[in-house]
Image (spheres, helix red, strand yellow):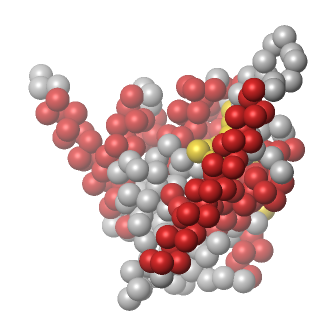
Amino acid sequence: MAHQLAGLIQTVVLCSELNFKRSAQMLSHPHHSDTPKPRTALVIFSGGQDSTTCLLQAIAEYGRQQVQTITFHYGQRHAIELERARWIAQDLGVRQTEMDLSLLQSITHNALMDQDTSIETADDGLPNTFVDGRNALFLLYAAIFAKGQGIQDIITGVCETDFSGYPDCRHVFIQSMNVSLNLAMDYSFRLITPLMYLDKAETWALADQLGYLDYVREHTHTCYEGVAGGCGVCPSCVLRERGLRTYLAQKAMANPS
Ligand SMILES: [Zn+2]
């Protein structure tokens, strides 16, 4: 297993280097144009804490007009997530495209999508909220859409620090997917994962640096149980609250009044 993984990483690194060389060649032979095109980005956006923080950072970095969002319906148990995503995209004034991938429901089962399954962790350590193939599918559709819009940068809030149980949140998967997408569409996508190595407290810190701590607290939805304002007991709420408490305690220590 470790051997296979090492082989995969090596392949990915080699492919990444190839892509890098190709990008470098493209940079050294730029198209002649007086006004360079502004960089644009597509944010995979669910209305949760992580993707909202990514969206806010993208707006700060690229400019509001250069950022679009894509939101996937995949048969989530709760409509509240999608409502939050719509509200935030509109409130921040960024374009949002919604895409229906609910056919996923007919071929896989998990606690995020099935109303009558309770949320728990299996013996192999994988929480039953894990949705097989979800991030691969999201990235594929996001990339198809992005290429159609002339966008190369795709931003996703996946993170391997807190949710190490999810294989498709790992950096190695994102690298491998980046290579696959570039090869699949002969296009230089850049999959960007600003939260990859941040823990929840650091993600809160990032929202605060961007000036949106209260905004993210008030308007994002992360609860697995679909409770507005959070149920306080599901793994997602626990992680979110613990991270927030840690961050606020660190902030208070750093700025004693
Ligand atoms: Zn909850």
Q: From the viewer's perspective, is 229 left or right of 226?
A: left
Q: Who is closer to the viewer here, 122 or 164? A: 164
Q: Who is closer to the viewer here, 195 or 177? A: 177
Quarter of the figure with residue 207: top left
Q: From the viewer's perspective, is 218 left or right of 15?
A: left
Quarter of the figure with residue 184: bottom right
Quadrant placement of the C terminus: top left
Quarter of the figure with residue 146: top right
38 vs 230: above or below: above
In percent of width and height, residue 22 lies at 74, 42
**Tag count in the figure?**
0
25 vs 123: above or below: above
The residue lying at 51 percent from left, 84 percent from top is 117
Q: Who is closer to the viewer here, 220 or 17? A: 17
220 vs 107: above or below: above
In percent of width and height, residue 115 lies at 57, 79
| Furthest residue toward bottom | 123
Q: Is residue 42 visible?
A: no
In percent of width and height, residue 215 lies at 46, 35
Q: Is residue 101 visible?
A: yes
204 vs 3: above or below: above
In percent of width and height, residue 37 lies at 79, 22
| Furthest residue toward top | 34
The residue lying at 56 percent from left, 63 percent from top is 10
The residue lying at 86 percent from left, 16 percent from top is 33
